[in-house]
Image: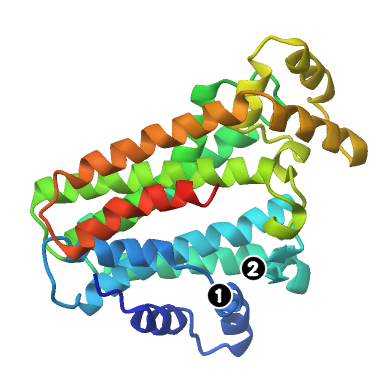
Amino acid sequence: MNVDRDRIEAALRHAVRTPDAYLTEIASHLIVAGGKRLRPVLAVAAAQVGRVEPVSDDVISGGISCELVHLGSLYHDDVMDESTTRRGVETVNAKWGNLQAIVAGDFLLARASEIAASLGNEVAGLLAQTIGRLCEGQIEELRHTYDRARTVPSYLMSIEGKTASLFAASARIGALVADQPRPVVDALTNFGNAYGMVFQLVDDILDITSTEEELGKPAGHDMEEGVYTLPVLLTLSAGDSAAKRLHEMLGVPLHGGDLADALSIVRNGGGLAGALESARNYVAIAEAECDRMPASPATDALRRAPQALLDSLL
């Protein structure tokens, strides 16, 4: 699979260039800071399934539209979370203020929509629907902040909206723009969704198991902010003395020693194993979708990608 990262990077920077140097600086802040560009890479891979030739500029544009939605959502997330660092640099809200961050995030979403519209009605509609799903997933998370009775289906619904839906859209847009056969488009969409679920589950597991140095932010940040992810929810549902102790601690903001104690309970309980098993199930779903795709180097790369996420936990 030939992923032209230079084309992706150049197109991404060009997409946020405006006559206003101040807006360009703010809009490109996290782009300049770097990133894996997983969403445009997935769009390119989807276009290359069953093929070997380079992808068109339109495929690159489709992937960029998804990356801009992702970046816009990060600008808004950092305002809501009052974050001060992202990708090793100051967040936009920390450097320029909340108002600028919100408007710049809106600008990135608008530019993403403009690019999608240039690729046709189906792509434009899909991207708009995906932005809506991101909002639905975020609202589902917010309404259960500090909720010790949050259910696993609520958690899964939230991460499917917040994270997996954009990976699914990236794969689908890449496939649509490349005029892949409809059964292949659907298989790639399902793959993207399953990959996104693995991605978020792994991220939530790492938030519990990693150190602050490894994460670049405090460990247990989600639990501290009242966002109870799958390892925490499964630990709470165990019904043993540790679960009862954790239940007594949660429901309010955690600080210092309390956060360390809560982390220790989750790390030593069965919730992490349960979350890992859930991630393995989504890996299997993603791999099964690859069986519905024509053989190619891109198909092989996609098949390896979900397991590679899991391996990062080892």
Residue that mark 2 sits on: 87
Residue at the outermost front position: 314
Q: Is residue 204 above or below residue 65?
A: above
Residue tagged 1:
34
Q: Is residue 277 left or right of residue 62?
A: right
Q: Is residue 133 visible?
A: no
- Mark 1 secondary-structure assignment: loop
Image quadrant in which you'd find residue 31: bottom right
Task: Name the quarter where the N terminus is drawn.
Answer: bottom left
Relative to residue 46, is residue 53 drawn left or right?
Answer: left
Q: Please indicate whether residue 63 sits to the left or right of residue 179 in the image.
A: right
The residue positioned 11% from the left and 58% from the top of the image is 180
x, y percentage for residue 166?
Answer: 40, 52
The kind of residue on which mark 1 rests is Gly
- Colouring chosen for the image of the structure: rainbow
Near mark 1 (Cα within 10 A), the count class, few <14, some 14-19 or many ≥20, is few
Residue nearest the viewer, comparing 228 with 278: 278
The residue at 60%/81% (across/down) is 23
Q: Label 1 to label 2, Cα distance in Å?
A: 7 Å
Q: Quadrant of residue 55?
A: bottom left
Residue at image x 73%, y 34%?
226
CB atoms of marks 1 and 2 within 8 Å = yes
Which image quadrant is residue 116 in? Answer: bottom left
Residue 234 percent across, percent down from the top left: 60, 22
Q: Residue at x 18, y 59 (%)?
A: 176
Specify the amino acid type for callout 2.
Arg
Depth order, front residue of 12/239: 239
Mark 2: which secondary structure? loop
Callout 2 crowding tier (Cα within 10 Å): few <14, some 14–19, many ≥20: few
